Amino acid sequence: MEKATRLHFYHHGDPGRQDEKKACHFCQIRSFATHSLFPVTIVNTEDDAVLDPHFRFTDSSILGKGVEPTKKEFLTGCECIDGEDCRYDACNCLQDVEDESSEGEGSDETPGERPRKRVYAYHSHGARADHLRSKYLASRHPIYECHESCACPPDCPNRVVERGRMVPLQVFRTANRGWGVRSTVEIKEGQFVDKYMGEVITAREANSRRAKSHIAQRKDVYLFALDKFSDPDSYDDRLRGPPLEVDGEFLSGPTRFVNHSCDPNLRIFARVGDHADKHLHDLAFFAVRDIPRGEELTFDYVDGIDDSENDALDPEKQKDMTRCLCGSKKCRGYLW
């Protein structure tokens, strides 16, 4: 690893080396706005491997050709004056939240006022403030947050994902699964870790990239469909058709290197800011249990919803399946 990093540490400050600096993974992660407080680091104590030189770190997704966000004149936010109001059903950002997601905390009633039902996704007070509620963690509910078009302040309690990653992450070389990710601090159950980022592309472009890939299933590891709100009967034609996809193979954040596990400690949730941009929702990683410092971060690549478990019992199908190396007690044997 020393040979690969020597150029960065000893020469990137020299005049005339700006192109090298742009291509350096260490310089890319040092440019993140949160670097001084929550740095991303890269270590390899296993072998001489380095990250793909064609890969670029980013702290935000980019929109590919043919992908358009909603025009600003159609964006709307809540009119809550105080962030406290953003926890209740009167907040416009929570208009699509299902009642059952309130986790039985009941209503906060004041004599003479309309009862207000607590419906937002996060705990409000104490050590678990800003952490996802238990019922949310066990669900597939999308998370609706306040956002930049809202009147509420930046410290609104319903802007957890919008405020960004607040845990340091380390991309490290594993013993048998290539690169992985861990944190240098303990992560608590329900805590937001980071988003999955990359180039947001059309379904047609995603299929084209799959076709060009030597191993299509390998490409699928980096492609995530934004299909949480896909609906053939939707009034929004962007939700009726094939969903957009996020390609993180050559442009992404540190979560691009998170490995699979059949017994994961992370789960991806769809996070919505402006409701007019549901077709461009975020993919947010949250911890589903307490994660000790240094433990590898993992999520279930298929989230337990495919037929690989049954296929793994068929010797003929096993020939074309990818063996799982997660090593957990709940390992299904094969990824797909």
Image (spheres, rainbow, N blue to C red):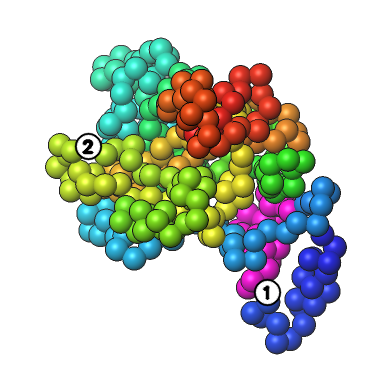
Residue positioned 53% across, 59% down in the render: 251
In this orientation, does residue 300 appear? no
Q: Which residue is mark 2?
A: 231
Above-or-below relation of 303 to 37: above
Which residue type carries mark 1? Lys
Mark 2 crowd level (few <14, some 14–19, many ≥20, 10 Å Cα) = some
What residue sits 56% from the left and 30% below the top? 334
Q: Position of residue 1 (x, y in %)?
A: 82, 59
Q: Which mark is residue 21?
A: 1
Residue interval drawn in magenta: 21-42
Q: Nearer the viewer, mark 2 or mark 1?
A: 2
The answer to which image quadrant residue 298 occupies is top right
| Image coords of residue 216 (percent x, y) | 46, 49
Q: CA distance from mark 2 to mark 1?
A: 44 Å
Instruction: Look at label 2 and name its amino acid.
Output: Asp
Answer whether residue 271 is visible to the viewer in this image. Answer: yes
Q: To which quarter of the image does residue 224 belong? A: top left
